[in-house]
Image (spheres, rainbow, N blue to C red):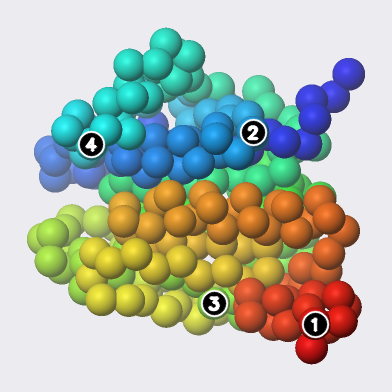
Amino acid sequence: MDKPKNQVLFVLTSSDRLGGSGHKTGAYLSEITHPYDEFMRAGYEVTMISPQGGKVPLDGVKMDDPINATWMNDTDFALQLETTQTPWQVQPRDFAAVFFVGGHGAMYDLPDHLHLRELVSEIYENQGVIAAVCHGAAGLVNLRLPDGPFLVQGHEVTCFSNEEEETVGMESVVPFLLEDKLKEQGARVTTAPKFTCNVIKSGRLITGQNPASAAAVARAVIETLRYMEDGRWVPDEDWCDWQQHNNELRGLL
């Protein structure tokens, strides 16, 4: 029997180095734990995958963060980080949403992973929600719909900004600037002041700018899924447009 559609697929990097720079990297821990905490408390199940499968490298491991500490001491959560599946081991029909986790490593192994792109595209075509936080938006790069256009084309999105990349001194290390690349592929990129929470909802595509946005992205995904579970209309438009339409349907305007 198929799993219920309360499954969220977390996509994490397998890269532990920033190209040939020698800098260590990985999946940014709070961008895993904070969204995971939101989904768990809302009653969703999470499956974790990475391009290579197995143990994922971690960055930003700060145990003075109480949510990091809680989940890193949870046996089931720790096991998932040690034993991620590959994109080939999961079925798109099982998932209501995809959540691309950040960390600079995502810039290296997510954009060009063909099977991962096919998997996520199929989930989206099955009316799934696609979300990304910070450098996790690298998973949206080169992601196309079955009829050809880039998924981000025409959507308002956000990501780790050029200003933020320059502030952390990585603008000449990363293979491309994420903000610029998303613009090249037709997205309308909106950024907030550096390192502040910023979440953009555009239809079933939800993005957050940086680690400070991680939990809020998860809450936006949950809100969107619940709208859809209620049979409410979710067009490929910005949140304010669908909220107005749904209020009209409910006779509130």
Q: Residue at x 54, y 53 (%)?
A: 219
Q: Give whichever of discs 3 and 4 has the lower sequence position.
A: 4
Q: Give the secondary structure at mark 2.
A: loop
Q: Nearer the viewer, mark 3 or mark 2?
A: 2
* Whole-number angstrom distance, CA of label 3 to CA of label 2: 29 Å
Do callouts 3 and 2 mark residues in contact (Cβ within 8 Å)?
Answer: no
Q: Residue at x 50, y 41 (%)?
A: 38
Do callouts 4 and 2 mark residues in contact (Cβ within 8 Å)?
Answer: no
Q: Nearer the viewer, mark 3 or mark 1?
A: 1
* Whole-number angstrom distance, CA of label 1 to CA of label 2: 29 Å
Task: Examine the image and state in which quarter residue 230 appears.
Answer: bottom right
- Mark number for residue 252? 1
Do callouts 3 and 4 mark residues in contact (Cβ within 8 Å)?
Answer: no
According to the picture, the residue beneath numbered tag 4 turns out to be: 65
The kind of residue tagged 4 is Asp
Q: Quadrant of the C terminus?
A: bottom right
Q: Quadrant of the N terminus?
A: top right
Do callouts 1 and 2 mark residues in contact (Cβ within 8 Å)?
Answer: no
Q: Nearer the viewer, mark 4 or mark 1?
A: 1
Nearer to us in this view, 140 or 70:
70
The kind of residue tagged 2 is Gly
Q: Position of residue 37 (x, y in %)?
A: 46, 36
Task: Examine the image and state in which quarter residue 159 appears.
Answer: bottom left
According to the picture, the residue beneath numbered tag 3 turns out to be: 156
* Whole-number angstrom distance, CA of label 4 to CA of label 2: 23 Å
